Amino acid sequence: MNIAIVGATGNVGRKTLEVLEKKDLYIDDLYLVASARSEGNKVRFKGKEIEVLDLKKFDFSKVKIAFFAAGSKISENFAEKAASKCLVIDNSSFFRMDPEVPLIVPQVNSEELKDIKKNIIANPNCSTAQLVITLKPLHDLFTIKRAVVSTYQSVSGGGKLPMDELTEQTKLFLEGKAIKSKNFTKQIAFNAIPHIDEFSSDGYTKEELKMINETKKILDDKIDLTATCVRLPIFVSHSESVNLEFEKPFTIEKVREALDKFEGCKVIDKRIDGGYSTPLEAEGKDETFISRIREDKTILNGLNLWIVSDNLLRGAALNAVEIAETLIKNNFYGK
């Protein structure tokens, strides 16, 4: 089994390497691919140094699976070419809403991997991934009619440059110096920005529309979902406040049990000071943590949840590697 990682030197690419190091996935040869400016750099993997190769020169016929972790523009220009030689698992948004490309969270809709038309599989948006893995067991039991989601997203969702800028702005703020934002529309240090990605004509941002459209594609297009996405001065992990309206009655006990049993979920819900999960505690963990589980008494069959997950893991690298594991286990790869 030969594997390539495109964008190996970026945030998600490096995290994909970390996940692969921890997994039992057998790899004969691992190829690290990036832009020409990274060519020749060396990255350590399982005690060995691997030289980074130039994407424009790389021959994808050398591998069975290629992880694309370099953004939509790279996927637009190179993913279909690569897919003519190998199977592509794409972390960008470029193919997500393509009707011929499955959008996969393995715990939720792995059966769709049986029908891969373009030799490309899309990874969902980081906010969507942690949401649907939480909604799936509840939808199976109680049928979700409507979901209202407010996100509190870390700067790592925008890449390394926003993370560096948060550090820089924090220092400037504490020193009482002027701040000029480079990667954000307003100051991010000690602030909250209700704006992620571009605005559409109806006032929603693309990030919000991704959550709406991707959840429908992955889980159920009958679910009515609305979202507000906010960027916070946090390095890693996204949080979500979720309000659900079910068609069927539920009990809090059944909700807790269903979530705690579902692969990838972990309930941390003690009604005491500190009896909940926060972004800091979720960082570096594989699970999606669910807290503050309580009935919404303003509507019939209403529920409130607090969801926290490491966006670089569940929302990107871990999900991509779990897609590969599912493919290999079921012998769906290598068309």
Image (spheres, rainbow, N blue to C red):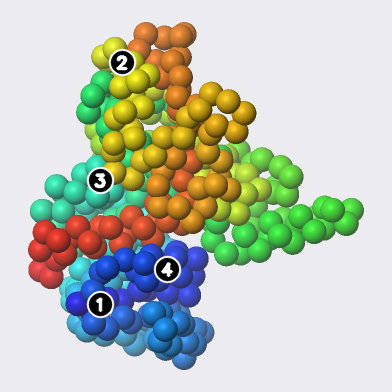
Q: Residue at x 69, y 49 (%)?
A: 188
Report the front residue among 9 and 100: 9
Mark 3 residue type: Gln
**Dot 1 surroundings within 10 Å: few (below 14), some, or many (20 or more)?**
few
Horizontal side of residue 251 vs 165, given as left or right: left
Helix, strand or loop status at disc 2? loop
Disc 1 or 4, which lies upstream in sequence? 4
**Dot 4 surroundings within 10 Å: few (below 14), some, or many (20 or more)?**
some
Disc 1 or 2, which lies upstream in sequence? 1
Disc 2 or 3, which lies upstream in sequence? 3
**Can you give x and y, in whole percent of width and height, for residue 80 in the image?**
25, 68
Q: CA distance from mark 1 to mark 4?
A: 14 Å
User: In the rendered image, which quarter is residue 89 located in?
Assistant: bottom left
**Dot 4 corresponds to which residue?**
18
State whether residue 303 is above or below residue 225: above
Mark 2 residue type: Phe
Q: CA distance from mark 2 to mark 3?
A: 22 Å
**Dot 2 corresponds to which residue?**
250
Horizontal side of residue 92 vs 61, given as left or right: right
Q: CA distance from mark 1 to mark 3?
A: 23 Å
Q: CA distance from mark 4 to mark 3?
A: 21 Å
Report the front residue among 173 and 24: 24
Count of marks placed on residues: 4
Check the picture and name the quadrant holding the C terminus. bottom left
**Can you give x and y, in whole percent of width and height, for residue 70 in the image?**
42, 68
Horizontal side of residue 43 vs 112, given as left or right: right
